[in-house]
Image: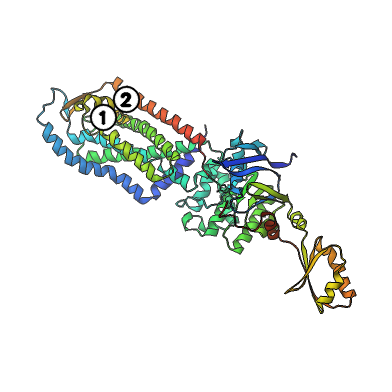
Amino acid sequence: MGGDDIIEVRDLEHAFGNFAAVRGISFTVKNGEIFSFLGPNGAGKSTTINILTTLLPLQKGTVRVAGYDVAREPAKVRETIGIVFQEDVLDRDLTVRETMEFHGRLYGIPREERRRRIDDLLGIVELESKRDERTKNLSGGMKRRLQIARGLMTQPEVLFLDEPTQGLDPQTRMRIWDYIRQVNATGTTIFLTTHYMEEADMLSDRISIIDHGRIVVSGTPAELKDALGEDVVYLETEDDEKARDALSGIEEIRSVTESPRGLSVTISADGSHCLPRIIERVRGAGIAISNVNLKKPTMDDVFVHYTGSELRDAGA
Amino acid sequence: MAWEFLTVYWREMIRFVRFRTQLFSSLLQPALWMAFFGIAMSSNFDRFTSSIPAPAGVVPLDYLTFMAAGVIAMTTLFTSLFGGMSLLFDKNWGLMREMLASPMPRTHIMLGVSLSGMTKSFIQASIIMAFGLLLGVQFFPGYSAARIALSILGIFVFVGVFSLGFLLFSSTISMRLESPEGLQGIITLLTLPLFFVSNALYPIQAFPPFLQTLSIFNPLTHLVNGIRYFALGGDFFAVGARYTSTTADVLGSFAYLVIFAAVMYLLARRTFERAVVT
Ligand SMILES: Nc1ncnc2c1ncn2[C@@H]1O[C@H](COP(=O)(O)OP(=O)(O)OP(=O)(O)O)[C@@H](O)[C@H]1O
Ligand SMILES: [Mg+2]
């Protein structure tokens, strides 16, 4: 494993009673990247985070975070990490400022420094006006933002974000993406889980998809999408029948079907390279094209491809 | 020395003053005990026991004075036994994960909670003493100001050690239980024997030998011994019996409470170090 891996997980297993929630996963997260951990409900994401953050004891395998072994030096690991939990965990009767103050004191941040960071962070997450409000009076989005600010307060080397944007409106989510990018730009490694695929796609440097406690695929968002190899070109022509014949013989074309949006041409290679040839062929046969559309696979397609389409809440 | 437990203490005290009903009931409850139970019982006891003459040279004390020490002890017991409850809520609402994932040593959680429980007991003991004096409790009979100050300090030391032991006990139970109802059940089960097999409200001299022996092992008895020694002196007469205690007796009681607290500390530490809360 390289020296620039800030998280190294090898053959990690974890069971609750005789239910194996994590079944032998290995992965690394590089220093300074945004790493996303995706998977259906019950896949084992939060369990993995709990082990990485020392909240669950290590049962089997090895885990190193920021160079420290979670089993042997949990206290060191705790000093280097920040966590935003999946559930809202705020003391209802503390104010926004007190919530931050408490967290800062837990980590032994000196008073002046604490004050400065609280001011900065409440500014960043736009909660200055709620400073003396009790957390029970905040909206759902404000609570999430407060928890993110709290997680950032200790300037951790690795920040774990377990579904930070769950149930938020699009504006708030986009703002949170901005915070995540800002924090990442200062050198903090981000470990993210989310059920919003476009979020993972946009933010992540690398992604691992986990299902039933096993990692099913890993890669950069582009790699994962390209690997599906299922770009689709939609063609609207003056004569779909003839166009279809004209396309026969192009090797990369896997199938051509009629669809409400015109001819749907599924391509097994990179669609943007095939597109000019497809157009030449159809034009060459004297058929006019009125509209062309290239659709690349989305992270949603990748996710469903690797994890199947059945619901997980019920069975897992 | 790490001081993070003060952070937990700080938060517990914010909660204490912020939960108005909890604050007022904890301040009012001991006063009500003194006012109603104390006054009602003292007219009874004083009637029964007035026929027994005090030995020559020994100060006779009325029942209200005798039981005031018991009320301090009992209030301390209740407050301390419930003191771990906030941990149970922290745990159930997921708040404890923030502390467990932080670099703060885990034992500081219980130290912070215990310190705040002790503070509450000190406040309550002060209220009982102040209110009791208003009602005519004859604490500190004929003491000089310096001796009063010293006696109050002695009472606080006893209350502090005793409450520490029970707070740690309560914290241990809270960490191991799932529901507040369970904790409540255990507290109810414990308080009855602890309270009645003690010298808090009546003399143990009249107990059957078996109960007398049992009461010697009851920490509450030793707390009451300590409070009475500091508040009433080493030789007084109340509820038809003469009470004498030497410095050695009081040190013995203190040692017993210290050992009790130490054992509870070890138990609690073990529980906290192994705690898994997700
Ligand atoms: N404390 C526990 N006791 C027993 N089973 C547990 C416990 N915690 C988690 N599990 C089980 O382990 C599996 C993985 O749970 P986990 O919370 O890691 O899933 P997840 O990937 O985070 O799912 P989600 O997307 O819904 O948050 C689930 O089947 C869950 O029921
Ligand atoms: Mg989860």
Of residues A59 and B208, the one nearer the viewer is A59
Q: Residue at x 66, y 56 (%)?
A: A308
Regarding residue A109, the answer to whether it shows in the image is no
Q: Viewer-proximal residue, B225 or A275? A: A275
Q: Tag count in the figure?
A: 2
Using the image as rendered, state which of residue A34 and residue B152 is in the foreground: A34
Q: Is residue B137 left or right of residue A70?
A: left
Q: Is residue A210 visible?
A: yes
Q: Position of residue B207 (x, y in %)?
A: 21, 27
Ligand 1 near label 1 (Cβ, under 8 Å)?
no
Q: Residue A131 in the image: state x and y as whole percent.
A: 51, 55
- For the residues labelled 2 and 1, the Cα–Cα distance comes to 12 Å
Q: Residue furthest left?
A: B51
Q: Nearer the viewer, mark 2 or mark 1?
A: 2
Type of amino acid at the residue the image marks with label 2: Ser
- Residue under pointer 1: B228
Check disc 2 and report the residue beneath it.
B253
